[in-house]
Image (cartoon, helix red, strand yellow):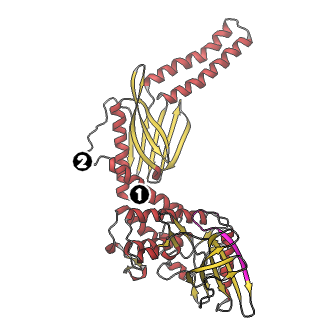
Amino acid sequence: MSNLHQPGDIISDRYQVIGLLGSGLTGKTYRVNDLNHEREVAMKVVSLQETSEWKIIELFEREARVLQNLRHVAIPAYVDYFHVDSNADRRFYLVQELAQGQSLATLVEKGWKPSEAEVKDIALQILHILDYLHKLTPPVIHRDIKPQNIICRDDGKVYLVDFGAVQDVYRNTLTRGGTFVGTYGYMPPEQFRGHITFASDLYSLGTTLLFLLTGRSPDTLPQKRMKIDFHPWVKLSPSFTAWLDQILEPIVEDRLASAEAAIAKLQASRSTAQIAKSAPTTAARFLKKPNYSRIVIRRRGNYLLITIPPNPDMLTIAGIFMLILILSPMLALMSGAATVQVVTVAVSMLVMAVVMFAILLSFGGSEEQIRITADRLELSKKVFDWKFWIYSSETALVKQLWCEMNVLRSGPHYNGAIEVGGNVHKFAISRTKLEVEWLIQEIKHFLNNLTRDC
């Protein structure tokens, strides 16, 4: 394909060409100056005269249509779409915001060798973009994720570009004539057969990450039973290796099914690994359960259930209060008090009951349960067999656990605290320091084992 424009060319009385950014199967992309707004933008051009198939024009129009409806900070925004006719040709133009930075392919060619942490960060950024695309209505599948289509800024933030191969799930066009949409080496096996799912984008992301880690095109790496055998080429943590293995499964049913699932699993390996750094090893665990503790811990594989009974002192106070609550209206009625007075007493006691419930929650008067699995964490409270407070989140969002001390008139009281997704929740309220520290040790040990199993 010849160079369609030279620096200085002005298109549609608005866009002045600065230089060529790159070429692809669907056209050429130029850096241009938007004269109306005095800013640099990216302009993609397809020439009807130089296009061998009408299908390319159809794909180009689809790209413009899809981009017009996308709103994501990591996807360069749509600016304009138009065509210009001449005696010999019709040229189609798609204008987007300019993604500042260099492609991952260019960075690797220049000698960049990212660390595992940097590769994980890029993976999470792209996964969040894919999660956005896949949850649109209709969902959008990119189909051509590769190092050339990911632009990295100096601050490490990335953009996903080139939606020329994009497909919404209501369409079936998968090839450009005899050429598959996508890039060999980065395409999953099912894409060659014309079968596309959300997991197809995950596979392409996985091969892109392999390129970053090895500096080699994925199709040059050895295979075992149709699966890329990257293990001899990289030295990674066991959890990240297992995660890569799962998104690179050649059989789509064996792969992680969605970007959301891939994010959760990758974040779980990162977060639990951070907790594991401060968790004691099996040999170093020295805190034993206090003889007086009535906390019950049940563990089955990757399932942990902790039951924390209510503070007995608080139950005694609550029992006395409930007795007063029941007897007060009855005594008022038996003493011949007016109905209004009886009602007033009843309402007052009801208000006090609400206050008592709040006190029970705040000072350990409720039974607490903590459930943790590889995927979910759930905290719940129960007062008088009434479970009314439940908090649920991803285990991956657990950041840290610690013991808190609160000084009251009766002396110091301790409780556990857990930070989940930026929120702090208290548990094991009004316990001894030894009991709380033992409980935190057990939770950290469980999370540590989850990390090793990932």
Q: Secondary structure at mark 2?
A: loop
- Estimate the x, y position of residue 330 in percent, counting from the top left: 64, 13
**Looking at the picture, does residue 350 appear above or below residue 114?**
above
**Visible residue check, residue 8:** yes
Q: Residues within 10 Å of mark 1 (few under 14, many from 20)?
A: many
Q: Quadrant of residue 215?
A: bottom left
**Looking at the picture, does residue 386 appear above or below residue 266?**
above
**Looking at the picture, does residue 29 appear above or below residue 344?**
below
Q: Quadrant of residue 327?
A: top right
Q: Which residues are magenta?
A: 71-83
Q: Secondary structure at mark 1?
A: helix
Q: Residue at x 69, y 81 (%)?
A: 11
Residue most extreme to the left: 283
Q: Residue at x 61, y 81 (%)?
A: 174
Reading the chain from its start, which is encountered first: label 2 or label 1?
1
The residue tagged 1 is 269
**Looking at the picture, does residue 382 appear above or below residue 184?**
above
Q: Residue at x 65, y 78 (%)?
A: 16
The residue tagged 2 is 283
385 on left or right of 246: right
- Estimate the x, y position of residue 312 in percent, counting from the top left: 43, 24
Q: Quadrant of the C terminus?
A: bottom left
